[in-house]
């Protein structure tokens, strides 16, 4: 059987994927220097 028929047609879900969120630099200016930014903030 050819390789293209053995591969999944719909792709896959990466178990090691990370979720990213875009943040403008202007929004980070409200914090003081050295402050740790976490997702909860």
Image (cartoon, rainbow, N blue to C red):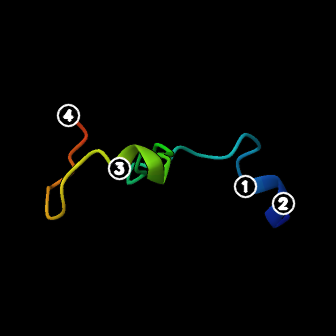
Quarter of the N terminus within the rendering: bottom right
Say whether disc 4 or disc 1 marks the residue closer to the N-terminus: 1
| Location of mark 4 (residue) | 40
| Location of mark 2 (residue) | 4
> In this picture, is 39 found above or below 34?
above
Give how far apart the Cα atoms at labels 4 and 1 are: 40 Å
Mark drawn on residue 28: 3
Q: Tell me, yes or no, if residue 28 can be seen here.
A: yes
Q: Nearer the viewer, residue 16 or 19?
A: 19
Query: Dot 2: what SS?
Result: helix
Say whether disc 1 or disc 3 marks the residue closer to the N-terminus: 1
Task: Assess disc 2: are there few (<14), some (14-19) or many (≥20) residues with their C-alpha within 10 Å of its C-alpha.
Answer: few
The reply to whether discs 2 and 1 touch (Cβ–Cβ < 8 Å) is yes
Q: Nearer the viewer, residue 30 or 19?
A: 30
Give how far apart the Cα atoms at labels 4 and 3 are: 14 Å
In the shown orientation, is residue 28 left or right of residue 41?
right
| Location of mark 1 (residue) | 7
Give how far apart the Cα atoms at labels 1 and 3 are: 44 Å
Mark drawn on residue 15: none
x, y percentage for residue 27?
Answer: 40, 43
Q: Residue at x 23, y 49 (%)?
A: 31
**Tag nearer the camera, 4 or 1:** 4
Quarter of the C terminus within the rendering: top left
**Tag nearer the camera, 2 or 4:** 4
Q: Residue at x 43, y 51 (%)?
A: 17
x, y percentage for residue 32?
Answer: 18, 54
Query: Dot 3: what SS?
Result: helix
Give how far apart the Cα atoms at labels 2 and 4 are: 44 Å
The reply to whether discs 4 and 1 touch (Cβ–Cβ < 8 Å) is no
């Amino acid at each position: 059987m050819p390789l293209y028929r053995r591969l999944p047609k719909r792709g896959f879900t990466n178990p090691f994927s990370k979720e990213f969120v875009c943040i403008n630099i202007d929004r980070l200016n409200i914090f003081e220097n050295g402050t740790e930014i976490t997702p909860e903030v």
